[in-house]
Image (spheres, rainbow, N blue to C red):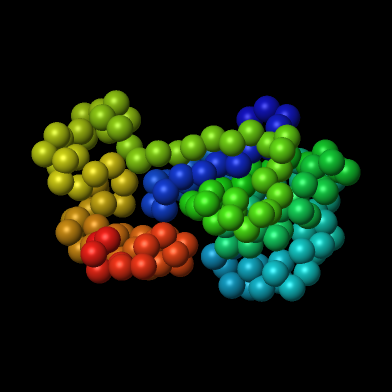
Amino acid sequence: MEQKSYLLLGPRQTGKSFLIAQSFRGARVYDLLDTSIYLAFSQRPQRLAEELTAKDTLVIIDKIQRLPGLLNEVHRLIEQRGIRFLLTGSSARTLRRGGVNLLGGARTKYLHPLTQRELGEHFDLNTFITRGGLPSVYFSDNPRADLDAYTGSYLQQEIVAEGATRNVSAFS
């Protein structure tokens, strides 16, 4: 990763968290699914600056869409301390709709579901057509249940919460 900060976006369960865990083992990572981290930063975003030291040249915040207000603190730390950030999120719409700071100097990259090329010898056309390319569903021992859970979660968290439709049953 260069000397820039990045915003890594993509649908839920495409492997963003797995990728950063495998690729950046020495970096400081904040997972906003961790309730204690989420509560600490939601109450005092400046706590991020207080915790970081000169050794923290790359900081990862996973699931930034859960706490978009933290982006102002991230932006300040990029500009004042030169810290690089890798932020992951599953909902760019949530971030944009909230009118939050999208870090103008940061580069945005997208992680999409798996492709035939990425699956290599594991690619099976029928499996791909019926399950799609989400790793957690493609490699599942119970893909129907996992796909139902994923779509239920998607309908609840993305469609209903975003107000994208008034008739959820017809949409589903």
Instruction: Locate residue 42, reporting x and y percent.
Output: 70, 69
Residue 163: image quadrant is bottom left
Q: Residue furthest front?
A: 166
Q: Residue at x 65, y 67 (%)?
A: 37
| Count of numbered marks | 0
Looking at the image, is 39 positioned above or below residue 82?
A: below
Does 64 sit left or right of 54 as displayed? left
Quadrant in which the N terminus is drawn = top right
Quarter occupied by residue 155:
bottom left
**Which of the image's four quarters has the C terminus?**
bottom left
Please identify the residue farthest to the left as the structure is shown: 126
Residue lying farthest to the right in this orientation = 80
Image location (x, y in percent) of residue 85: 69, 43
Q: Is residue 62 visible?
A: no
Q: How far across and down, in percent of the image, does residue 142 sit?
A: 18, 59
Residue 143 horizontal/vertical position (percent): 19, 56
- Side of 114 relative to 47 (left or right): left
Q: Tell me what residue is drawn at x 29 percent, y 26 percent.
A: 117
What residue is at 31 percent from the left and 46 percent from the top? 134
65 vs 115, nearest the viewer: 65
Tell me which residue sits at (24%, 44%) in the image. 132
Of 105 and 164, nearer the camera is 164
Q: Does any portion of residue 168 appear in the rendered image?
A: yes
